Amino acid sequence: MEVIHIPSLVKKTGQTDTIKFEECISDLETLTPVRGYLQVTHHGNYLEVKGELE
């Protein structure tokens, strides 16, 4: 996963950053990697975090 720095998040369009990922999780017994995204939006005094995985 990537680090999201709030000062750089504020400068992005819509103050939003989306990270797509495809990773294996060692404690999860599966043959395929976990795929999904994590979206973080800065709203002044709080962060909105959304995510989806398969």
Image (cartoon, helix red, strand yellow):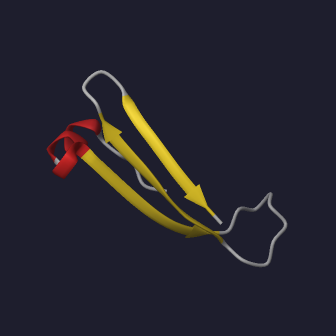
In this picture, residue 51 sits left or right of residue 7: right
Q: Is residue 15 above or below residue 19?
A: above
In this picture, residue 25 sits left or right of residue 5: right
Q: Quadrant of residue 33?
A: bottom right
- Report the front residue among 40 and 30: 40
In this picture, residue 46 sits left or right of residue 10: right
Q: Residue at x 85, y 66 (%)?
A: 29
- Report the front residue among 21 and 16: 16
Q: Position of residue 43 (x, y in %)?
A: 28, 30
Q: How many marks?
A: 0
Q: Residue at x 21, y 37 (%)?
A: 7
Q: Is residue 1 above or below residue 3?
A: below
Q: Is residue 35 above or below residue 45?
A: below
Q: Quadrant of the C terminus?
A: bottom right
In this picture, residue 21 sits left or right of residue 8: right
Q: Residue at x 67, y 68 (%)?
A: 24
Direction right: furthest residue: 29
Q: Position of residue 45 (x, y in %)?
A: 30, 21
Q: Position of residue 2 (x, y in %)?
A: 42, 55
Q: Quadrant of residue 40?
A: top left
Q: Position of residue 31 (x, y in %)?
A: 79, 78
Direction top: furthest residue: 45
